[in-house]
Amino acid sequence: MTSLRKWRFPILIGSGLIAAGVLFYFSKTHISSDKTQGAIGQRDVYRDGQVNTADVATPGSAPVATQAILESSEFKSLAKNQAFQELMKDASFAQLSREQSFVQLLSDRSFQTMAQSRMFAELVRMDAFKQAMAMGSAQEMQTRMAQDFHFNALRQDARFLELTKTEAFNRLIRTEAFAHMMSNGMFVGLLQRASFQGLFKDAAFANLVSHAAFQQALLQGSAAQMMAQARVE
């Protein structure tokens, strides 16, 4: 009995310390889990907030990417150009701009060079040239043109012979984008416009149509909206 009384207090103290240790362990684990989940939740909210801010425009303002175009020196310079204004509002240009091949051509250096040429504009109207471009690969086109009597008129055309001496022309007729667009009457018609040809002589236009954000805006059908936004500002 005396021995039991002697050890009673140490046993009680020891039990209390063990219980306190267990309680502390579980409370610490629960708090750490809550903090971890809270941090993940805050990170997700922050990321979502960044996306919404960048992509969604407030009423009366332009999207961030479009705003960057409007503020560029090239666009500000061209916004005063009547030919550029008319092109951006033109229905056929708007429809063509939804074609990936057309937008790709706009930034192609060979096309930019050839689009300035009146001789080239006259050549693309020829049925023989259209048929040649519709043949498929550039190698097949050149083989058929060299052997098929149907293309005698094209082989003897002074404009064609002159253009084949230029690197830009030879590179352009090998591109799939150009071959694809040659079957589009609106594209051929656009190449006939003196105002369109003249725009490519302006370095600002060549730089602008090569800008990824501007190309994306064209594909989304925002050409006319950009001009309207420019007038508002």
Image (cartoon, rainbow, N blue to C red):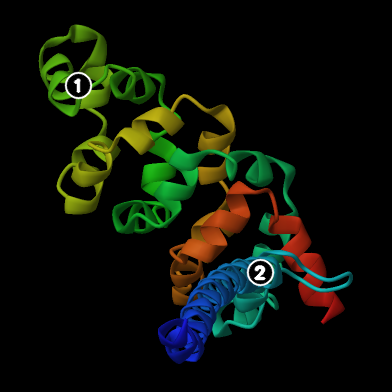
Looking at the image, which residue is at 49% across and 74% down?
22
- Is 214 or 78 nearer to us in this picture? 214
Q: Tell me the element at label 2.
A: helix
Category of crowding for the residue at label 1, using alpha-carbon neighbours closer than 10 angstroms: few (below 14), some (14–19), many (at least 20) = some
Query: Quadrant location of residue 140?
Result: top left
Mark 2 / mark 1, whichever is N-terminal = 2
Q: Which mark is residue 180?
A: none
Give the image location of residue 5, x and y in percent. 49, 87
Category of crowding for the residue at label 2, using alpha-carbon neighbours closer than 10 angstroms: few (below 14), some (14–19), many (at least 20) = few
Q: Is residue 182 above or below residue 166?
A: above
* Residue labelled with disc 2: 45
User: Is residue 42 in view from this perspective?
Assistant: yes
* Residue labelled with disc 1: 141
| Camera-side mark, 2 or 1 | 2
Q: Amino acid at mark 2?
A: Val
Per the model, the C-alpha gap separating discs 2 and 1 is: 56 Å
- Is 217 or 84 nearer to us in this picture? 217
In contact (CB < 8 Å): disc 2 and disc 1: no
Give the image location of residue 233, x and y in percent. 82, 82
Q: Amino acid at mark 1?
A: Met
